[in-house]
Image: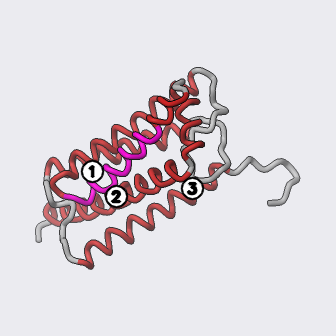
Amino acid sequence: MTEALSLTVVVQIAIAQFAAFASLLLLAAALHKLSGLARAVRAVQDLTGLAGSPARFAAIGVSVAELAASIGLWIAPVRFYAALLAALIWSGYFVFLLQAVAAGRSEVDCGCSFGGAHRPLGLFQMLRAAVLALLGLGVALSAAIAPGSVAYDVSAAAIATQLLAGLALLALYAALDQVVTQPPLRAGVVA
C-alpha cells in the first residue's frame, strides 16, 4: 500500500467516525428538542424573534431536519445531502447566535446544551456551531469526492467501530458541554 493510498484510507476512516459522531449528535439534539419542546420553542423565540405557533413549528421543523440528517449520514447515496443539511442547520445556529450576541442578548438560553443550566452566549457557543458546520461540510466534501467510501466497509465490525467512535466523540462533546455550562468558581470556594 502506498503512502498516499494509506493516508486516503486513514482520512476516510476518520471521516466515517466523524460522520457517526455528527449523526449521533443530531439524533440526540432532535430527541432533546422533542422531549423538551417548551424549552426548544423558547430558544427559537429568543434567538429568532418568532412567537407562538411559528416558533413551535420552527422548533419541530429543526428537530425533524436534525433527525433526517442523522439518518441520512448512515446511507451512502444520500450522505452528501444529509451532511449538507447538517452543515446548514449548524450554520443557522451560528448565524442566530451571532445575531443574539451582537444585539446584546447574551443571557438567553439558546437550548444549545443538553443540561438545564446555561451560560451567557459567547465565543464558545459560536465557535461550537461554526466547528460543527465545518464538520458537516467536511463530511459532505468527502461524500462528494469519494461516494460510498465513508462507509469503507459494511461489515458489522466496521459499523460497530464507527458507532463506538461516534459514541466516544459524543461523550467527549457532552463532557465539554457540561464543563462549559458550570458557573465560574468564586474566590475562596471549594468545588
State the extent of the magenta-drawn residues as a range.
59-75
Q: Looking at the image, is mark 2 or mark 3 earlier in the sequence?
A: 2
User: Where does label 1 land, which residue?
Assistant: 139
From the viewer's perspective, is 20 left or right of 129?
Answer: left
Q: Which residue of the protein is positioned furthest toward the bottom in this rendering?
A: 157
**Residue ID at (85%, 48%):** 187
Q: Is residue 100 above or below residue 144?
A: above
Residue 128 within the magenta-colored segment of the rendering: no
Residue 70 within the magenta-colored segment of the rendering: yes
**Label 3: element kind:** helix
**Amino acid of disc 2:** Phe
User: Where does label 3 land, which residue?
Assistant: 176
Where residue 177 sits in the image (x, y, percent)? 57, 53
Query: Mark 1, residues whose alpha carbon is within 10 Å: few (<14), some, or many (≥20)?
Result: many
From the viewer's perspective, is 86 left or right of 43?
Answer: left
Q: Which residue of the protein is positioned furthest toward the right in this rendering?
A: 188
User: Where does label 2 land, which residue?
Assistant: 18
**Amino acid of disc 3:** Leu
